């Protein structure tokens, strides 16, 4: 059975992504939780990965770190590539937006950290608003072009990558276009995400660096 090393569920966006993939495709795994507030966090995480970051997937003697790398590994060796669309054009589109999420949107990440338990108000910068507009455009284009309910029709790694953004938008009350809102609402109704949210709400530990803005 896989072991997935995770951070706090209230805050750890990167942990959420592969967790959702494993849940959606019914792959059994054991959760190993590491507090993001631990004084010896880097030392603890160095036991699992040279990056000293979460998440890490442990498959027997193989350790895979980085959310997207974990998703790709699971997809290739355990899902027969079901987690990407089969159609070549759709596959390229899905990989493009997933990797854009992986490598971009720095202002959004910094100004609106995931904080599932909270409802907060922040004064978004121009750069952050630009990130939000781009994400809105991605969601709108995908759900309109591929007829939803997920970005590319069926659930894919692209949906895993954007799930934490949905949680950010929920926390900070981000306004969306009608098409993007339909995708947002669908993600929030996902039974697996609700399970993660319940676990996050049950946590009590506070990571102050991720407590952005003021209470709504």
Image (spheres, helix red, strand yellow):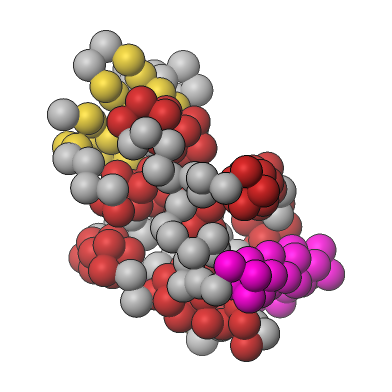
Residue at point 55%, 73% (across, down): 147
Q: Residue furthest top?
A: 61
- 146 up-or-down from 70: above or below: below
- Where does residue 164 sit, x and y in percent of width and height? 48, 60
- The image quadrant where one finds the N terminus is top left
- 184 up-or-down from 51: above or below: below
Q: What segment carries the magenta color?
A: 117-146
- Does residue 207 show up? no
Residue at point 51%, 48% (across, down): 85
**Residue nearer the viewer, 209 or 25:** 25
- 107 up-or-down from 65: above or below: below
Q: Residue furthest front?
A: 87
Q: Quadrant of residue 31?
A: top left
- 206 up-or-down from 69: above or below: below
Q: Is residue 153 magenta?
A: no
Q: Residue furthest right?
A: 126
- Does residue 105 show up? yes
Q: Quadrant of residue 125?
A: bottom right
Q: Quadrant of residue 203?
A: bottom left
Q: Say left or right for 209 vs 154.
A: right
- Where does residue 69 sit, x and y in percent of width and height? 49, 31
**Residue nearer the viewer, 21 or 39:** 21
Q: Say left or right for 190 vs 155.
A: left
Residue at point 43%, 37% (across, down): 81
- Where does residue 78 sit, x and y in percent of width and height? 31, 31
Count of numbered tags: 0
Residue at point 46%, 16% (across, down): 50
**Residue nearer the viewer, 58 or 199:** 58
Q: Main secondary structure of the magenta part?
A: helix
Q: Is residue 143 magenta?
A: yes
- Where does residue 18 sit, x and y in percent of width and height? 38, 43
């Amino acid at each position: 059975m896989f072991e997935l090393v995770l951070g706090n569920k209230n805050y750890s966006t990167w942990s959420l992504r592969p967790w959702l993939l494993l849940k959606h495709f019914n792959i059994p795994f054991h959760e190993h939780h590491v507090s993001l507030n631990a004084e010896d966090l880097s030392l603890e995480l160095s036991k699992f990965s040279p990056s000293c970051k979460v998440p890490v997937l442990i498959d027997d003697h193989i350790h895979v770190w980085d959310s997207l790398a974990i998703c790709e590994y699971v997809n290739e060796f355990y899902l027969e590539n079901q987690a990407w669309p089969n159609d070549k054009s759709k596959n390229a589109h899905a990989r493009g937006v997933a990797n854009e999420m992986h490598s971009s949107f720095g202002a959004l990440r910094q100004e609106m950290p995931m904080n599932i338990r909270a409802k907060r108000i922040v004064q978004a910068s121009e750069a952050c608003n630009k990130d939000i507009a781009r994400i809105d455009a991605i969601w709108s284009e995908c759900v309109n072009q591929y007829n939803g309910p997920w970005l590319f029709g069926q659930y894919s790694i692209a949906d895993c990558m954007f799930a934490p953004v949905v949680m950010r938008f929920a926390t900070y009350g981000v306004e969306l276009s009608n098409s993007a809102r339909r995708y947002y609402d669908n993600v929030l109704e996902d039974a697996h995400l609700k399970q993660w949210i319940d676990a996050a709400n049950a946590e009590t530990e506070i990571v102050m660096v991720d407590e952005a803005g003021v209470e709504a």
